[in-house]
Structure formats: structure tokens, C-alpha cells
Image (cartoon, rainbow, N blue to C red):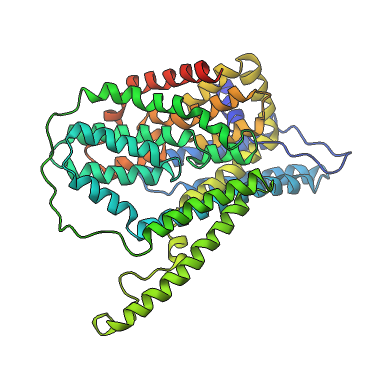
């Protein structure tokens, strides 16, 4: 048990930071009370994260506290040895890594929220519902769209949108809703694995410089296999026939400027890639420049809306800006702040565990004794239980000497491994709440063998075409 705890702590460990003073050395605290206390603190915090759905305590709270306490213990240990600046430099290094990812994700979330506010995804949902497709056709369309949208939008938003379609048309068919939700989770996670923008873990790999932007797309076919194999198996369990018509008033859900914001989002992505590939600047600076595109367009849209609203101001309540008013800061405020702060807590807490010295303990065993392929496959399986963000952050900061083939493998497995269980990804957890009573943990678990078949098939195809 002690060996397992040490191994798990090592997997979740971060990087030790280079000391600025040549005479100073990092302390090995792995066998000290500081190290043991840090492991216990992090384990307790993560246990509370796992119980989020039961106790209704947001996941950011325990990891934020754990991060602070762990670094307090580290600072006390280093100060007692007269090394007063080493811990400071270490925490600054970890915080800078987080800051780059924070602003990148904040811009992406702002754009997604702006599209939601403008009714872009509602329009897509209404269009699909109105087509009158059969259950099996809708199963493949929603899963396929989840696979294709998640590379540019996060897999959580993509899954929620497609689940809304499933719920809208399958009200009287619980089997269809359950299978459709499983398919959406698999498709969203698989689609996010072959794009630098599809998941936080792929974004981390790209920003760390382990893989170039276009290299990720070598995972397209393995990711597609990961989605298609279980979908083909579930296809035969789907009910036959068509759902009853959902009706509707035929009014468009799309507000003015919706498609322009979609275009600006793609332009922002191009800007971020160009900053990285041609100017050799961090992609986050390109994303922040892209935020300026949205802010200027928001200024134009707001002024245009106000001019139009003036004509009918007598029909609106006092102080109202009208139905179509647009404010960028409203969309920033609606970002997933709990996720962003959870991300901070994980990086800082995990960074502290790594700085204590558990990283070197695990790295030699996992990648030295087991080998890169076995280690990377196991990391994918672990991501079905433990959030893939700390797992991938651990791998990046271990920085094992691996070829491109293996970095692609761990990117694939960490991205799609979460599909094995409904609690293995944010998309699965969210859909259990959205489709409560239809999509459940045990309902997903029933199809885990089929999902596992897709998982190992995607790994085989990766070696076949990229090896």
C-alpha cells in the first residue's frame, strides 16, 4: 500500500525547479515529515474532489487550500536550512506555467460563451431536431459532431450541446438517451485528443513544446478509431424508428453577429498558431490579441444594438439594453471559474509534490522499468479515475526521454482514457447531471468493454500508421 501511495504521488508530481545559486541544492524531502504530510494533504483534497457530486463542494476549494498548505510546509523546510530563495523561485516557475494556460483558456472560454449568448449552438440544435432523423441517424450525427466540434471548442461545451439534442428528440426513449450520451462523451474526448485546442492536456503538451501544432493531427485516425469502434458496437443496441416531432415555432435562435464571432474565433486560433510558429512567441499572446478582435466587434455590435433599440425604447423596461445587447465582460464573467481555479490548485499542489522529490522516485520506475509504451498506456487507464490534468502535468514535468511517437501516444491515451468511465472526464460528469435518470455511472460501465476495445484499437492503429 505504501509503495502504491508513493507511486501515485510520483505520478502526480511536478518538476523540480533549477536553483539560481550554484552552491544551493534542492532538498530531498521525500522521507521527511514534510513529504508525508504533503502526500496526505493532497490525497485528502483529491478525495473531496472525487466526492464533488455527492457533497456539492466545488472541486476548486480543496485543491486551492491544499496548494497553499503544501507550499507553506516546503517554505518552512527550506527556511530552516537557510535556503530562503529556492522555494520562492520554484513557486514562481509553477505560477508562470499556470498563468500562460489560464489566459489561453480564459480567451477560449470567452469566445465559447459569446457564441452561446448569440445562440450559435441553439441554432445548430434546433436545426438537427427539425430534420426528423431516425434514432440511429441522430446517434451518429450527434457523436460525429461531438468528434468534429471538440477540436476547436472544449469537450465539455460540445458534449452539453449534443446532449441537448439527444434529450430534445428522445424524450420517450431512455435507451436512446443513454447510448447517445455515452457516444457523445467518447466522441468529444476522442476529438479533443488530436488538436492542440481540443483539451487542456493537449494544450499543455503544445505550449510546453513537446509536439508542434501540425504533429497533433497525426492522431486523427487513431482518435477516429477510438470513437468509431464502440459506436459500431452500440449501434446494434439502438431502438429502431424515428422520434416524434418536437414541434417548435420555427423562429431562429441565432442573434445578430453570431456567425461573425465564430469567424473571429477561428481568426484568433490562426493568430495564436502564427505567433507560435512564425514569431516564436508563446501562443497565449496570440490568443490575447484575438480577444481584442472580439472586444472591438463587441463595441461595434453594442453601439449598433443601442441605435436600433432607440427606435423602440418605449416598449422596453427601464434600464434594459434590449434582447440583443452584447457585452464582452458578461461573457468573461461566465467563464468556468471553478475549473480555472481547480487548474491552479492542481498545478501548484502537484508542483509542490514534485519539488519535494517524488518525481525522481516515480520517473525511474515508470519509464525506466516498465518502458515508455507500457507507462503511457497505464497513464491513459489512470486518467479514467484520476483527472487527466494532473496526470499529464506530471508526465510533462517528468520530461522522460521519449521520441515523438511516444509523446503522441501519451497525448492520445490521456485524452481518450477518460471515456472508460463516466467519471473519467468533465464531459461524462456533466452529462450525468444533464441527463439524470437516463445516463448513469453503471449504464456507462456496462459498455466499458466496448470502449476499452476502442481504446486499445486506437493505440494499435497509432503504432501502425505513425510508428
Give above or below for 185 relative to 226.
below
Residue 66 occupies quadrant: top right
The residue sitting at 48% across, 40% down in the picture is 199
Instruction: In the rendered view, tell whether residue 384 sits above or below residue 201.
Output: above
Locate residue 169, reporting x and y percent. Answer: 18, 43
Q: Could you tell me if residue 132 is visible in this image?
A: yes
- 43 or 37: which is nearer to us? 43
Q: Say whether residue 318 is visible.
A: no
Nearer-the-camera pick, 47 or 182: 182
Residue at left offset 58%, top offset 57%:
288
Quarter of the image with the N terminus is top right
Residue displayed at 57% across by 32% down: 215
Residue 158 placement (x, y as % from top left): 37, 44
Looking at the picture, does residue 173 appear above or below residue 96? above
Residue 144 left/right relative to 37:
left
Residue at x 54%, y 20% (from the top left corner): 466
Percent of width and height locating residue 341: 52, 51
Quarter where residue 40 is shown? top right
Dividing the image into 4 quarters, which one contains the C terminus? Answer: top right
> Residue 120: x and y, percent?
34, 55
Give the residue furthest to the bottom. 314
Give the total of numbered labels: 0
Amino acid at each position: 500500500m505504501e509503495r502504491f501511495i508513493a507511486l501515485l504521488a510520483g505520478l502526480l508530481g511536478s518538476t523540480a525547479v533549477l536553483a539560481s545559486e550554484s552552491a544551493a541544492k534542492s532538498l530531498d524531502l521525500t522521507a521527511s515529515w514534510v513529504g508525508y504530510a504533503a502526500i496526505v494533504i493532497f490525497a485528502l483534497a483529491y478525495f473531496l474532489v472525487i466526492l464533488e457530486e455527492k457533497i456539492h463542494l466545488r472541486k476548486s476549494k480543496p485543491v486551492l487550500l491544499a496548494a497553499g498548505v503544501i507550499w507553506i510546509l516546503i517554505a518552512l523546510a527550506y527556511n530552516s536550512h537557510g535556503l530562503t530563495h529556492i522555494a520562492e523561485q520554484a513557486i514562481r516557475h509553477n505560477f508562470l506555467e499556470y498563468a500562460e494556460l489560464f489566459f489561453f483558456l480564459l480567451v477560449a472560454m470567452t469566445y465559447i460563451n459569446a457564441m452561446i449568448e448569440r445562440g450559435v449552438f441553439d441554432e445548430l440544435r434546433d436545426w438537427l431536431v427539425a430534420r426528423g432523423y431516425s434514432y440511429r441517424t441522430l446517434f451518429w450525427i450527434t457523436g460525429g459532431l461531438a468528434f468534429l466540434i471538440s477540436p476547436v471548442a472544449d469537450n465539455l461545451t460540445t458534449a452539453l450541446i449534443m446532449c441537448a439534442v439527444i434529450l430534445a428528440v428522445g424524450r420517450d426513449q431512455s435507451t436512446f438517451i443513454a447510448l447517445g450520451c455515452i457516444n457523445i462523451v467518447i466522441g468529444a474526448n476522442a476529438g479533443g485528443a488530436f488538436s492542440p485546442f481540443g483539451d487542456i492536456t493537449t494544450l499543455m503538451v503544445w505550449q510546453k513544446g513537446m509536439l508542434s501544432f501540425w504533429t497533433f493531427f497525426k492522431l486523427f485516425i487513431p482518435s477516429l478509431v477510438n470513437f468509431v469502434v464502440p459506436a459500431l458496437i452500440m449501434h446494434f443496441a439502438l431502438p429502431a424508428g424515428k422520434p416524434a416531432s418536437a414541434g417548435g415555432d420555427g423562429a431562429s435562435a441565432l442573434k445578430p453577429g453570431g456567425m461573425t464571432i465564430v469567424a473571429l474565433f477561428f481568426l484568433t486560433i490562426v493568430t495564436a498558431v502564427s505567433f507560435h510558429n512564425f514569431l516564436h512567441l508563446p501562443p497565449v499572446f496570440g490568443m490575447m490579441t484575438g480577444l481584442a478582435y472580439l472586444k472591438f466587434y463587441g463595441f461595434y455590435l453594442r453601439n449598433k444594438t443601442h441605435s436600433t433599440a432607440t427606435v423602440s425604447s418605449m416598449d422596453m423596461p427601464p434600464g434594459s439594453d434590449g434582447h440583443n445587447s452584447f457585452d464582452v465582460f458578461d461573457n468573461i464573467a461566465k467563464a468556468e471559474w471553478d475549473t480555472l481555479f481547480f487548474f491552479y490548485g492542481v498545478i501548484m499542489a502537484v508542483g509542490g509534490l514534485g519539488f519535494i522529490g517524488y518525481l525522481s522516485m516515480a520517473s525511474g520506475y515508470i519509464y525506466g522499468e516498465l518502458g515508455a509504451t507500457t507507462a503511457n498506456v497505464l497513464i491513459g487507464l489512470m486518467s479514467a479515475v484520476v483527472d487527466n490534468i494532473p496526470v499529464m502535468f506530471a508526465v510533462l514535468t517528468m520530461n522522460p526521454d521519449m521520441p515523438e511517437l511516444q509523446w503522441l501516444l501519451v497525448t492520445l491515451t490521456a485524452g481518450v482514457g477518460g471515456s472508460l468511465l463516466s467519471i473519467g472526464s468533465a464531459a461524462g460528469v456533466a452529462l450525468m447531471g444533464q441527463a439524470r435518470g437516463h445516463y448513469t455511472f453503471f449504464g456507462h460501465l456496462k459498455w466499458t468493454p466496448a470502449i476499452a476495445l476502442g481504446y486499445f484499437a486506437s493505440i494499435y492503429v497509432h503504432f501502425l500508421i505513425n510508428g
